[in-house]
Amino acid sequence: TVHTLEGGVVGGADEAVDRGVWSLTGSAQLALVFSVVFNSVVKYAVSAFCNKHVGVIVLTVWSTMTPVFTAILSALVLRSPPRWSYLGMVPIVAGTLLVTKSRADAAKEKEESRKDIKGPGVGAGGSDGLSTTFI
């Protein structure tokens, strides 16, 4: 018996006993490769890189974008037609951008407060040649 997969698993409880040969169509093979490569290998490589460079909080916030990137890539690579459920991307993207912007604003404020604390003539290259810092 030859079973084919087209866009998903075919079969039920009765067919689970059948030890026939499975055959994947070309589009199912592409979908399988896409899922393995982009949803695991690339995702974890990018996550490890980002965790090292931007920290765990930013990584966690941006990990909510995984379904958004998956939908966009599946539309581009697999030519999957858009669905109404894709409107769920709007609050995910908006929330991610708001958190990212607030973190950038907080970092900017923190940097400005550091400059205010140091004051003129204090720190590296001060008038007495000593390096003093209040932070």
Image (cartoon, helix red, strand yellow):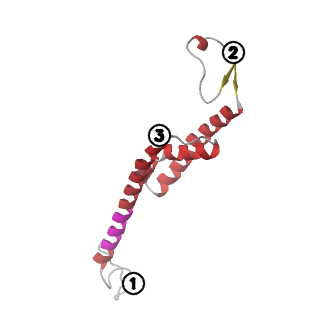
* Residue 20, disc: 2
For the point 43% across and 49% down, which residue is it? 90
Residue at 64 percent of width and 12 percent of height: 18
In the drawing, what numbered circle is on residue 85? 3
Q: Amino acid at mark 2?
A: Gly
Q: Is residue 74 magenta?
A: no
Q: What is the quadrant of the C terminus in the image?
A: bottom left
Q: Residues within 10 Å of mark 2 (few under 14, many from 20)?
A: few
Q: What span is colored magenta in the figure? A: 104-113
Q: Nearer the viewer, residue 63 or 71?
A: 71
Q: Position of residue 109 (x, y in %)?
A: 32, 69
Q: Is 109 placed above or below 58 here?
A: below
Q: Earlier in the sequence, mark 1 or mark 3?
A: 3
Dot placed on the residue nearer the N-terminal end, 1 or 2? 2
Front-most of residues 73 and 42: 73
The quadrant in which the N terminus is found is: top right
> Label 1 vs label 2: CA separation?
78 Å
In the structure shown, which secondary structural element does the residue marked by tag 1 occupy? loop
Asked whether the residues under the numbered discs 1 and 3 touch, taking CB atoms below 8 Å apart as contact, a structural biologist would say no
Tag 1 residue: 125
Helix, strand or loop for disc 3: helix
Q: Earlier in the sequence, mark 2 or mark 3?
A: 2
**Is residue 117 left or right of 37 when viewed as pictured?**
left
Mark 1 to mark 3: distance in Å? 59 Å
**Depth-wise, is mark 1 or mark 3 nearer the camera?**
3
